[in-house]
Amino acid sequence: MNFLTLMVILALIVAVAALIWGVSSMAHGGSYDREHSEQIMFTRIGVQAVAFALIVIALIYSIV
């Protein structure tokens, strides 16, 4: 397993963790959810973008 594969796996784990964080915050509701929902969403989107970019890089690297 090379470094790029480990980075993809790590990015996917972080994306799932951010998703779980957002869903649990939304399920509990309250002031924490009202104050942090946008921040959690943008964090999840950013992590997913990084994971997607790493997957594309890994695919291009595997072809070349």
Image (spheres, helix red, strand yellow):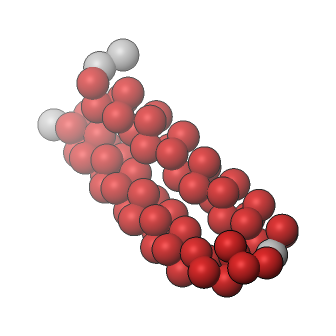
Given residues 1 and 29, the one toward you in this image is 29
Please, is residue 22 above or below residue 38 in the view?
A: above
- Taking the view exactly as shown, the residue that stands out farthest to the left is 64
The residue at 57%/55% (across/down) is: 18
The answer to whether residue 31 is left or right of residue 48 is right
Q: Position of residue 11 (x, y in %)?
A: 43, 44
The answer to whether residue 11 is left or right of residue 23 is left
> Which quadrant of the figure contains the C terminus?
top left
**Could you tell me if residue 63 is visible in this image?**
no
Q: Position of residue 39 (x, y in %)?
A: 50, 74
- Taking the view exactly as shown, the residue that stands out farthest to the right is 28
Please, is residue 1 above or below residue 53 in the view?
A: above
Q: Position of residue 25 (x, y in %)?
A: 73, 66
Please, is residue 8 above or below residue 45 in the view?
A: above
The residue at 25%/47% (across/down) is: 57
Please, is residue 10 above or below residue 29 in the view?
A: above
The answer to whether residue 64 is left or right of residue 18 is left
Give the image quarter of residue 48: bottom left
The residue at 67%/83% (across/down) is: 34
> Which quadrant of the figure contains the N terminus?
top left
Give the image quarter of residue 28: bottom right
**Could you tell me if residue 33 is visible in this image?**
yes
The residue at 46%/34% (across/down) is: 9
- Taking the view exactly as shown, the residue that stands out farthest to the front is 31
The answer to whether residue 45 is left or right of residue 2 is right
Given residues 28 and 17, the one toward you in this image is 28
